Image (cartoon, coloured by chain):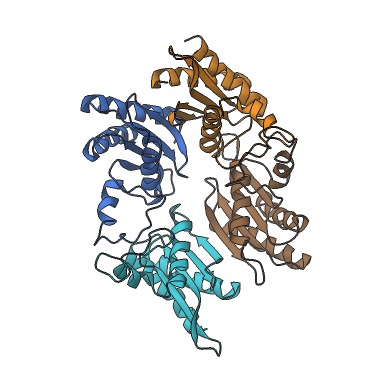
Chain colours: A orange, B brown, C cyan, D blue
Amino acid sequence: MNLELALRMTEAAVRQAVREGVAISVAVVDEGGHLVSFQRMEGAGIAGPALARGKAYTSVALRGSTLELAGRTAPGGDLHGLPREGFVCVGGGVPLWADHGEGWRVVGGIGVSGGTVTQDVACAEAAAEVWRTR
Amino acid sequence: MNLELALRMTEAAVRQAVREGVAISVAVVDEGGHLVSFQRMEGAGIAGPALARGKAYTSVALRGSTLELAGRTAPGGDLHGLPREGFVCVGGGVPLWADHGEGWRVVGGIGVSGGTVTQDVACAEAAAEVWRTR
Amino acid sequence: MNLELALRMTEAAVRQAVREGVAISVAVVDEGGHLVSFQRMEGAGIAGPALARGKAYTSVALRGSTLELAGRTAPGGDLHGLPREGFVCVGGGVPLWADHGEGWRVVGGIGVSGGTVTQDVACAEAAAEVWRTR
Amino acid sequence: MNLELALRMTEAAVRQAVREGVAISVAVVDEGGHLVSFQRMEGAGIAGPALARGKAYTSVALRGSTLELAGRTAPGGDLHGLPREGFVCVGGGVPLWADHGEGWRVVGGIGVSGGTVTQDVACAEAAAEVWRTR
């Protein structure tokens, strides 16, 4: 992950948010789960810094989209016993994969918060598309 | 949010608590989720400072009543995967909205704890009514 | 400690703050160190909830004024090794003593934050005077 | 504080970092101390998210530059007894003041981490200059 790419992904997420008519927060983290960039749009709530970052971190830490993890951590899911601290298992977090010659691994994550789950997922996917076509 | 209004809202919540025959804690926070005023009635439990403040904060951070959020964070709800730390998703927290010329946004919140959920909600609503008719 | 007395003490602290020309936060805690009341004046900073409450708590927990504790926790002081977490050893916290027939003990505390240390101490002392002449 | 201005300030801080030959993290927070934007340059350490944000938050919460606060929280300073948790009192955090008709108050803060204290301060000041000439 690098800052320039993180900002391009953020831009794509924000453009999607404008199309959705919603104000969001967008976080991008590196393979260590540490923040690379964050932007909160005018009118997006104060939980954005914690939730967007949390979704991005969670998608890296558990190597899956937080939408999928929402199902797996629900009662009956295989990850239901996961501690709640530190993980945000609500749609809007997407891991970013790359193969730098040592097999595919997660090298970063994007997290979006501020809209409905569907809107957050759409914004995160718009950002992930920038990653996939980088 | 300002202190004078916060105290008037608190007074309304306390009056409702007296009608309900219950001792409560009442917290009012600003748009940043920071405490503006707090009062704990004689006989209200020591969890009041954390829970009333937590409900008020949560209603601002997630921009909804904590009663509604209780349903959304329950199994099957769209926010079920939300971490429990930092958020109190039990009825009794109500966000306060205003339009200062830039569209409606949450500019504060009220949180009540000490009675049953129904009583806490009734007290918080009595306070919110002061806000709406300010 | 009871709410009515806590509010009278708070009022005295706020009156002193107006005389000092400063905006403060005032916290009153009970003998368990738990918040009974809190008020943040217009213009007082967002650290007030943590610091005023912290000073009140510290004055109860360590049974001394936080001004005196500031000296004792400084290098060379007898409490220098105290952990920093949870204690605010800056002037503006005053313990409240009472003898309910079992000897004198601390039954609450007041904490003020927002001005200079001297101003915070003056406001806390104005509140403590209400306690002593109750 | 708004995102567009936060990004312009961040850009100025990053330009100064390039001049200084150092890789930094830059955080901008609003008047509630909540993150509005964050950027970590290629090569800046993983403590950046916590430290830059912490400096920005501290400058808002305590309404002063963290460089000045470093002196005041040192042994002998009037704030020496302040708890270390939650506050980062190392140079590189600068509060941003505005008067929206109710007197001057802190409406946001900038925090820089990654270089020496002198470099962090220089980068934060470059950002603050954008604020002052906005």
Between C24 and A25, the one lying in front of the other is A25
Task: Tell me if I can see residue C25 in this picture.
Answer: no
Number of marks in picture: 0
- Residue B99 is left or right of residue B91, and the answer is left
Task: Tell me if I can see residue A105 in this picture.
Answer: yes
Image height check: is D108 above or below B4?
above
Residue B67 screen position, x and y as percent = 72, 47
Image height check: is B112 above or below A67?
below
Image height check: is B76 above or below C27?
above
Residue at (60, 52) in percent of width and height: B54
Between A94 and B2, the one lying in front of the other is A94
- Residue A85 is left or right of residue A116, and the answer is left
Quarter residue D116 falls in: top left
Considering every residue shown, the one lying at the far top of the view is: A133
Between C133 and C86, the one lying in front of the other is C86
- Residue D75 is left or right of residue B90, and the answer is left
Residue at (51, 36) in percent of width and height: A49
Residue A42 screen position, x and y as percent = 52, 31
Which quarter of the image is occupied by the C terminus of chain D?
Answer: top left
Residue A24 screen position, x and y as percent = 56, 29
Residue at (65, 66) in percent of width and height: B45
